[in-house]
Amino acid sequence: MKTILRAALLSLAFLLSPIAQAQSPLFADIKWGSTVEEVKRQLIGKGFKPTATDKDGDLKFEGKLLGETMAGWAMFSNKKLAKVFIVLATPDRRAIDKYNEVRKVLVEKYGDPSDTFKMFRRPYYEGDGYEEQAIRLGKARYSTFWGNGLYVAITDRLAVTITYESDEWGEEGDRRRAKSASAL
């Protein structure tokens, strides 16, 4: 019985340790559940500029990230931070390189992803020199997912997006989709 209790306590200590907590994906080290004012303060401290709050209470911000101009949205559920969405305005010819750079930084920080997709449809293929064109036409996809609410992708406009989602976002995202669909 003592062995089981000791093992349970050690497991609990690990789960609460800074090492285990460091693996949770956080943009700019802003904790999930932060208020709008806390998020604004932390964004400013990291060199980003909060610009507007929309009707849902989400906070838009802008700045530079990995040398690129970016726009971001800190999204809230019950006035608590639940999702951060980033768009890097990459020049078309550098979209794949920037995606690879972002992916590398995230792998170094959060470990190996659970899934990576690099898919092409005919007549395009990796290495043909037309990868960006294929992405723009919807005939190629680059995306990487971690199993913890983090993913990075290239859009059909050749922008790189980075998404951080907390466990709270699922319900809030469903609520917003239902509200949006109610007009149909």
Image: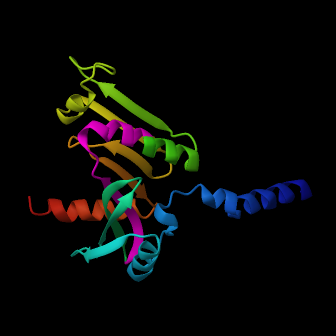
Tell me the residue at 25%/32% (across/down). Answer: 132
Residue 9 drawn above or below residue 127: below
The residue range painted magenta reads 79-100
Q: Is residue 104 above or below residue 121?
A: below
In the image, residue 135 above or below residue 122: below
Task: Classify residue 7 as left or right of residue 35.
Answer: right
- Towards the viewer: 178 or 130: 130
Query: From the viewer's perspective, is 55 left or right of 144?
Result: left
Residue 14 within the magenta-colored segment of the rendering: no
Could you tell me residue 174's position as x and y percent?
30, 60
Residue in view at x 76 percent, y 62 percent: 13
Q: What residue is drawn where x is 30% and y is 33%?
A: 141
Residue 48: x and y in percent read 38, 69
Q: What residue appears at the point 34 percent right and 43 percent down from the top-left corner? A: 153
Q: What's the colour scheme?
A: rainbow
Q: Is residue 83 part of the magenta span, yes or no?
A: yes
Of residues 108 and 23, the one nearer the viewer is 108
Farthest right residue in view: 2
User: Which image quarter is the N terminus in?
Assistant: bottom right
Q: Where, by quadrant of the figure, is residue 50 drawn?
A: bottom left
Q: Is residue 30 left or right of residue 69?
A: right
Residue 66 position within the rendered picture, expressed as x and y whole percent measured from the top left = 42, 53
Q: Is residue 92 above or below residue 84?
A: above
Residue 161 picture location, percent across and down: 33, 50
